[in-house]
Amino acid sequence: MVCSSLFAIPSQDTIQNSHSNHLLDSLFISTENKLIEAKNLTDSADYPNAYDNLWIVLNVADSIKNPSLKYKAYKQLSMLYSIFHNYEKAYSCVDSMFYYANKTKELSVKAKGNLHFSAAITYRMQKKYDEAASQLKICEQLFDSLNNPIDQKLYILTEKAHLNTLQGNYKKAEELLIDITKQTPSNHSYVSILYSMWGDFYSEMNNKNKALEYYNKSLIAISKQNTRIGLRVELLSKASKLNYSLGNNKIAFEQMEASKQLGDSLFGSQSIRNKQLFEIKDSYREIKLENQRIQKQQELENLKSEEEKLNLQLGFSIALLITLIIAAIVVVTSLKKKYQLEKKLITERTRSEVEMKKKELTLTALQLMEKDRLLDEIKTDLEKIQQDKGDASIHKIRNTINVNSKKNWEEFEARFVQINNLFYDSLYKKHSDLSRNELKLCALIKLNFSSKEMAQILGVSADSINKARYRLRKKMNLTRDENLVTYINTI
């Protein structure tokens, strides 16, 4: 069993998958090489072939669904369109660059920084200096987080110095250029750019001799390295203007003639290579549209084969859904009516019970009042009889009659709290400074007793009740327009 497992023959699917993965890897590597080739072609000013290579990359990236290749291609395309002043397409490429970069998994910090650097260059070439500075700042922050040495962020600092020159921040530009120059050997591949930016700085400072010196240094570096041919056109033009202003007419003429010839060969309308550039068919878009057409046709065929099944399922689902909705509406309506009826019955029953208990409480209070009144009358009559006849037994009977108003009130209050259990709590929250007698008065007002009846219950005069009501209004801060009874009934 061990031997058979060790020497098991792989399945056909395994072989096919392995072969497919190998082809994809090979295709990816060859496409990455196309990107490198496009970069080298741009540096040597072979723009048509660079442009062609980039659209081939986009076509392959679409076919294998690789966003990494797409953002890299759009990054280079934004530069090409900027060189030819096609700013609308350059902006579009910058947007596409960021869009596909966001779809790329595990994009490194350095790669993110390079994206913002490319956007900065595009904006700077179109003289949008504020946007360029903003993108460059993000780029610098990302690279600073990596703690890379200065030689690995030389191009960022050089671009920063150049932007400061263009924005008129000459002191900052000079400080940066001096620091960069100290760190950059004379044979460095980026030295032609550095010298060019020194020339621009001195030109802005109106130091023509210094500017001319650095433009010539940059031209020499370009000749030695045989790169950045497009920059050579611009440098020859700038040097020619400076020589003319300094009276070096012969040199100025020669440089202007050289700039014109080189510019025509690279950018002019008669350039064979650029004529090819503008006549290149947008093969990427044509292939993409064709792929979309084929894909849609296949989708339509699949949809037709399943259309009847889907329609049947849809019809059944709709019928079932309608039935469920109707059933749900009936059930909910029935439950709602039942709940409302039960709630109404409970409310009415509760209200009736409260009203009944209030009536019982009121009747009890009145009975207590009547009992106390009768007892007082009996005691008064017995007192008169005792005075007339001097009978000691009558005095003894009189003393046994006890009118206990306090105990009567406690019984009354206990029943009141049972019925109005929240009344005292709510009253105390609003008016915590009420006295015991004032609380009694509020309870009697809640039961709609008249002042006369309250006087009898509390064993005081009606005038005392009126005075107590007046003091109670003041404590409750009621205005003349506010009714005391109405207010207490709302608590």
Image: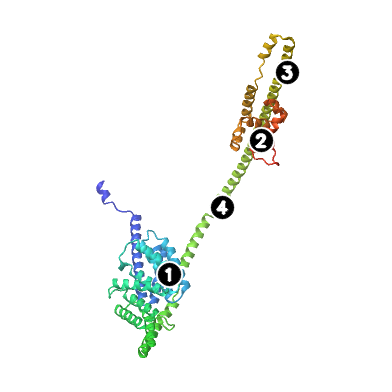
- Is residue 318 in view from this perspective? yes
Q: Amino acid at mark 1?
A: Ala
**Residue 427, how many percent across, how many down?**
61, 35
Q: CA distance from mark 2 to mark 1?
A: 79 Å
**Residue 77, how many percent across, how many down?**
41, 71
Q: Relative to 447, is 55 above or below?
A: below
| Disc nearest the viewer among 4 and 3 | 3
Which residue position holds label 2? 471
| Disc nearest the viewer among 2 and 1 | 2
**Residue 188, how many percent across, how many down?**
29, 73
Q: CA distance from mark 3 to mark 1?
A: 107 Å
Q: Amino acid at mark 4?
A: Asn
Colour setting? rainbow
Sequence order check: which comes first, mark 2 or mark 1? 1
Q: Relative to 400, is 138 above or below?
A: below
Q: Amino acid at mark 2?
A: Arg
Sequence order check: which comes first, mark 4 or mark 3? 4
Which residue position holds label 1? 132
Q: CA distance from mark 3 to mark 2?
A: 32 Å
Which residue position holds label 3? 377
Q: For mark 3, give the secondary structure.
A: helix
**Residue 132, how many percent across, how many down?**
43, 70
Q: Amino acid at mark 3?
A: Glu
Q: Quadrant of the C terminus?
A: top right
Q: Quadrant of residue 217?
A: bottom left
Which residue position holds label 4? 311
Q: Relative to 94, is 200 above or below?
A: below
Sequence order check: which comes first, mark 2 or mark 4? 4
The one of 481 and 141 positioned closer to us in this rendering = 481
Q: Relative to 232, is 455 above or below?
A: above
Sequence order check: which comes first, mark 1 or mark 4? 1
